[in-house]
Amino acid sequence: MSKKSLLILAFLIAPHLALATPEYDACYQKAQDDDQVALCMKAETLRLTKSLQEAYINVSKHEQTSSWNKGNGLISGNLKDMYNSWLNYRNKYCSLFTLASEHMFGSQNFNQERCLLNMTNDHLELMKTILINASSGGDEHMHEDGEAE
């Protein structure tokens, strides 16, 4: 795949990589084809997965959400079930996405890793929102003028 095609692909995945690391950026800049970009995305997905697991653990420890978990972090309880269900959904969805994208641009590896990366990043952001909401102390029910509803 040409550098021009890689640039176009970058615009398609860039919105989801606001949290990309310098290592990802350096890997991406060195990539010569979409399979090499896929390797960069795979490494970034692994990094994000670790951050996602940490977010789940933080939710399990938060005083407002820990009782909902009814377990021990990602070892047992609702959060473990939720994480495993999400992981299963993500993997199956990305398998279908990759199959459906077979005649589109990019290699099979590229499309698979792009999907995994985007879904992992999106889910991490959702889990961060849970932590923000749980830590807000009810500020989400305030009007713009600071008055409570």
Image: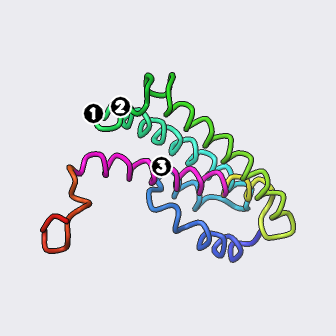
Three-letter amino acid code of the residue under disc 2: Ser
Q: Position of residue 67 (x, y in %)?
A: 36, 30
Specify whether 110 is left or right of 147.
Answer: right
Label 3 crowding class (10 Å Cα cut-off): few <14, some 14-19, many 20+? many
* Label pair 3/1, CB-CB below 8 angstroms: no
Look at the numbered discs 1 and 2 and tell me whether their residues touch, using CB distance below 8 Å: yes
- Mark 2 and mark 3 residues within 8 Å of each other at the beta carbon: no
The residue wearing badge 3 is 124
Q: Secondary structure at mark 2?
A: helix
**Residue type beneath disc 3:** Leu
Say what secondary structure mark 1 lies in.
loop
The residue indicated by pointer 1 is: 63
Residue at figure coordinates x 26%, y 60% from the top left? 140
- The magenta span reads 115-136
What residue does disc 2 label?
66
Viewer-nearest of labels 3 and 1?
Answer: 1
| SS under mark 3 | helix
Question: What kind of secondary structure does the magenta stretch mostly adopt?
Answer: helix
Instruction: Kindly indicate the quadrant of the structure image that contains residue 146.
Output: bottom left
Left or right? Give the position of 6 relative to 44: right
Going from the N terminus, do you reach mark 3 or mark 1 first?
A: 1
List x then y, in percent, for residue 24: 53, 53
Q: Nearer the viewer, residue 43 or 130?
A: 130
Q: Residue furthest right?
A: 103
Q: Is 6 located above or below residue 116 in the figure?
A: below
- Residue found at the very far front of the displayed protein: 149
Q: Residue at x 63, y 73 (%)?
A: 7
Q: Is residue 118 left or right of residue 56?
A: right
